[in-house]
Amino acid sequence: MVVKVPYSNAGQGVFIITNKRDLEKFMETPDYYEKYIIQSLVGSSKWIHQNDVADKKDYYHVGTRPNNRKEVFAMDLRIQVCGTDIGFQPLAIFGRRAALPLRDQLSDNDNSWAMLGTNLSHKKDHGQWATDTERLLVLDSNGWNQLGLTMDDLIDGYVQAILAHTAIDRLAQQLIKCNGGLDLTMFRELNNDAVLINEILI
């Protein structure tokens, strides 16, 4: 499973739990917020077939096209859009892949984040942020071939990005009162996380 802190980004606050060691690491983290998101794990299709209790509708990573070593990497596609006077328009599209290829079998010793985490941002030892550009997939001829996508996939992703953008914007408008203040009553109905609310009010 995957446990997420809902209010984090850049890959922070995401815990992929595939074995006892991962669970212990998560349990050792301080309980800061009151709410978490729990998701089923999206891994390799071969992991699903090895799971006796797996649902036929379970999702899995199609991944990149196999390289010369027949390795397939988990990847995602990022589509950035902007709203203009004439409607939404695309800004940028790029892909990101995981650091390690997907294994056929997942063992307790495997680094699940390195196989499934695609975020490029990471913190260095001294606390500064850095970007792992080696895993960035630019949509030139080489990057496009690695992704193995079609034009229909791009259109589908573009529509999803616009729908998500619109939904967030409409919800944000409902949370703002006529005087420009935050409607805390409605916010608490949607997410009554006292720690988060205190952060917002501060």
Image (cartoon, grey):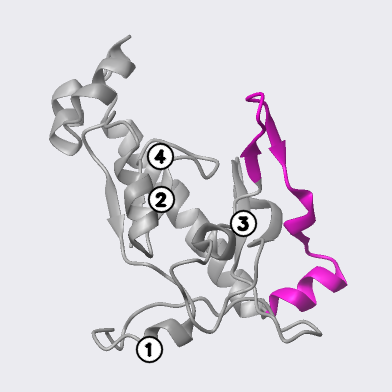
Badge 4 amino acid:
Asp
Which residue is tagged 3? Answer: 78
Residue at disc 1, secondary structure: loop
Are the two marked residues, 4 and 3, in contact with CB atoms closer than 8 angstroms?
no
Q: Is residue 53 above or below residue 40?
A: below
Tag shown at residue 169: 4
Q: Nearer the viewer, mark 1 or mark 3?
A: 1
Q: For this rendering, which residue is in front, 120 or 82?
A: 120
Which residue is tagged 1? Answer: 50
Report the magenta residues as a range: 121-148
- Looking at the image, residue 77 sits to the left or right of residue 145; the answer is left
Q: Is residue 51 visible?
A: yes
Q: Which of the two labelled residues, at mark 1 and mark 3, occupies the earlier sequence position?
A: 1
Q: For this rendering, which residue is in front, 76 or 85?
A: 76
Q: Is residue 88 above or below residue 98?
A: above
Are the two marked residues, 2 and 4, in contact with CB atoms closer than 8 angstroms?
no
Badge 1 amino acid:
Gln
Q: Gap between marks 2 and 1, in whole Å?
A: 22 Å
Which residue is tagged 2? Answer: 15
Q: Which of the two labelled residues, at mark 2 and mark 1, occupies the earlier sequence position?
A: 2
